[in-house]
Image (cartoon, grey):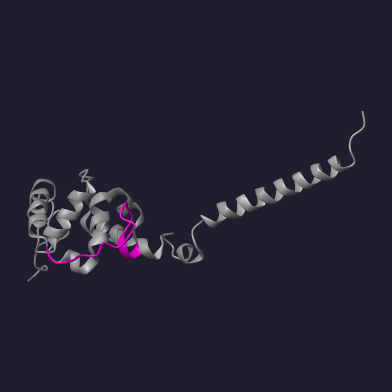
């Protein structure tokens, strides 16, 4: 039985095509690596993470007009889960939270509430706070809705010392 003359050429072509596809897959995998800008920062965090925190909130939260019902829900969550360690205008177990949303932004505050472990192990500013307060914020198992409600409540509170 003889092999048609075109088969070896097809086989070589398929091998080359597979090699190119494998090379392309490697390039796609490499594209998921941190960008040069992210790796230039010693923390290895992206610019977004440095500004907005590390956690499940990956898009900037834009606040509209105050939602008083949501703020009331947030006050309940805050009272149950946060008030043992945080006060509005004074240092306590944790830092004062009056005016925190204006200072850090809602996205950062929500990521801190939802991912405290990731924040105090990787975020340089939160690491500094941990060094100052010497107490790790426990994960209170808040939902995204709870965290958003707490942000709404906190934005109604005056800045520390006000």
Asked whether 89 or 57 is in front, the reply is 57
Residue at 84 percent of width and 40 percent of height: 7
Q: Report whether residue 94 is seen.
A: no
Residue at 89 percent of width and 34 percent of height: 3
Asked whether 57 or 104 is in front, the reply is 57
Residue furthest to the right in view is 2
Q: Report whether residue 37 is seen.
A: yes
Asked whether 82 or 111 is in front, the reply is 111
Q: Indicate left or right for 130 with 27 as reference.
A: left
**Vertical position of residue 76 compared to residue 90: above or below:** above
Residue furthest to the top in view is 1
Give x and y (percent) for residue 5: 90, 41
**Vertical position of residue 103 compared to residue 29: above or below:** below
Whether residue 12 is in magenta: the answer is no
Q: Which quadrant, please, contains the C terminus?
A: bottom left
Q: Indicate left or right for 125 with 92 as reference.
A: right
Asked whether 68 or 130 is in front, the reply is 68
Magenta part, dominant SS: loop
**Magenta extent:** 50-66
The quarter of the displayed image where residue 126 is located: bottom left
Whether residue 51 is in magenta: the answer is yes
Give x and y (percent) for residue 152: 14, 59
Q: Indicate left or right for 133 with 80 as reference.
A: right
Task: Tally the marks.
Answer: 0
Q: Which quadrant, please, contains the N terminus?
A: top right
Residue at 80 percent of width and 44 percent of height: 10
Give x and y (percent) for residue 70: 11, 55
Give x and y (percent) for residue 23: 66, 51
């Amino acid at each position: 039985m003889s092999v048609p003359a075109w088969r070896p050429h097809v086989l070589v072509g398929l091998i080359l095509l597979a090699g190119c596809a494998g090379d392309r897959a490697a390039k796609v995998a490499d594209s998921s690596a941190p960008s040069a800008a992210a790796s230039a920062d010693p923390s290895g965090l992206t610019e977004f993470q440095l500004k907005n925190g590390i956690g499940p909130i990956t898009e900037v939260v834009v606040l509209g007009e105050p939602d008083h019902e949501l703020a009331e829900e947030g006050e309940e969550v805050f009272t149950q889960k946060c008030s043992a360690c945080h006060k509005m205008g004074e240092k306590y177990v944790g830092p004062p939270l009056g005016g925190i949303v204006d200072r850090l932004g809602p996205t950062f505050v929500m990521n801190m509430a939802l991912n405290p472990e990731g924040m105090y192990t990787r975020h340089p500013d939160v690491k500094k706070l941990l060094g100052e307060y010497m107490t790790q914020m426990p994960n209170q198992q808040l939902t995204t809705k709870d965290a958003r409600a707490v942000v709404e409540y906190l934005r109604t509170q005056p800045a520390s010392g006000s």
